[in-house]
Image (tube, grey):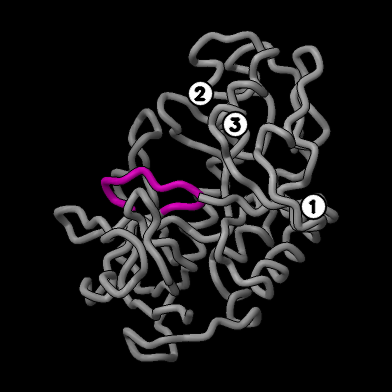
């Protein structure tokens, strides 16, 4: 299935963008109806919330929680810079953009809308060579020009793959992420996802440890309920998150990839070796 070229403009004023999600105003909103999945949700300003394909950055506002803000903020700033947005000012609590030179032209390449009614997209600044509404067979070379790719190149995002991403595109993004890790870029020198990290309370994952956001979200939900760390695997098991281990082509559940020894938690597979389903 080809990607659909959708021209539009990026907006952040009045919103709380982060490193993997931003508001987009399509010039022709009806094009969103051509994407697979549920109808995309547009707000009163005609803006859709995008979910950027194949990346996950540290959470700035998951429920009432966040991850270490140094890298969450760096990711947010870097994404906006890639899309041409400057002069960004936040409110006193850092929860909403109150001023910015935004309303910047750009385009997305998308095929579907996810369950939360956000278009899943590769985001680009400027005008595309193709006409608005064109079908495009995306190549790795073109993909590397996207903001998504740059977030992995900078080491400020984790590769996080879901079912349906073409293998040649996934491999190109994995190469970027592995190179960023090897070069010690961005968050990678601080990442504890596979090495393991001690969970001594909510602050240990909101303030101290840099970990894969998917793992953080599960831990935040669990710790919010007040359970002992020893029960975390069982908590995740009940969620039945299906995941494919790429290197072995083995389908399992997320809990089987989580190790808990005492109060130390770790993921046993690197993020780029996983494809989540659903």
Q: Secondary structure at mark 1?
A: helix
Between disc 3 and disc 1, the foreground one is: 3
Between disc 3 and disc 2, the foreground one is: 2
From the image, tell me which residue sits under label 2. Answer: 221
Classify 10 Å Cα crowding around label 1: few (below 14), some (14-19), many (20 and above). some
Q: Residue 104 at x, y = what percent? A: 34, 68
Q: Residue 80 at x, y = what percent? A: 46, 57
Q: Nearer the viewer, residue 278 or 268?
A: 278
Quarter occupied by residue 215: top right
From the image, tell me which residue sits under label 1. Answer: 181
Q: Secondary structure at mark 3?
A: helix
From the image, tell me which residue sits under label 3. Answer: 216
State the CA–CA distance, disc 3 to disc 1.
20 Å
Magenta stretch, main secondary structure, is loop
Q: Which residues are magenta?
A: 12-21
Quarter occupied by residue 267: top right
Between disc 2 and disc 1, the foreground one is: 2
Q: Residue at x 73, y 62 (%)?
A: 174
Callout 3–callout 2 Cβ contact below 8 Å: no
């Amino acid at each position: 299935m080809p990607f659909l070229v959708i021209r539009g403009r990026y907006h952040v004023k009045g919103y709380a963008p982060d490193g993997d999600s931003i508001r987009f105003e399509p010039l022709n909103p009806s094009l969103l109806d051509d994407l697979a999945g549920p109808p995309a949700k547009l707000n009163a300003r005609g803006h859709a919330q995008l979910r950027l394909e194949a990346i996950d950055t540290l959470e700035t506002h998951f429920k009432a929680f966040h991850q270490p803000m140094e890298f969450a903020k760096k990711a947010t700033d870097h994404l906006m810079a890639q899309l041409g947005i400057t002069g960004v000012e936040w409110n006193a609590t850092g929860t909403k953009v109150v001023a910015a030179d935004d309303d910047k032209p750009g385009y997305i390449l998308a095929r579907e809308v996810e369950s939360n009614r956000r278009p899943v997209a590769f985001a680009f600044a400027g005008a595309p060579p193709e006409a608005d509404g064109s079908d495009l067979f995306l190549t790795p070379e073109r993909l590397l020009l996207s903001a998504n790719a740059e977030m992995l190149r900078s080491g400020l995002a984790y590769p996080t793959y879901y079912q349906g991403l073409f293998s040649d595109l996934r491999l190109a993004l994995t190469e970027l992420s592995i190179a960023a890790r090897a070069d010690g870029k961005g968050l990678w020198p601080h990442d504890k996802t596979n090495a393991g990290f001690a969970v001594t309370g909510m602050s240990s994952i909101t303030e101290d440890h840099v970990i894969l956001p998917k793992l953080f979200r599960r831990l935040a939900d669990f710790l919010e309920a007040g359970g002992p760390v020893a029960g975390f695997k069982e908590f995740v098991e009940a969620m039945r998150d299906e995941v494919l281990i790429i290197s072995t082509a083995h389908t399992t559940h997320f809990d089987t990839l989580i190790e808990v020894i005492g109060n130390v938690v770790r993921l046993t597979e690197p993020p780029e070796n996983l494809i989540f389903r659903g």
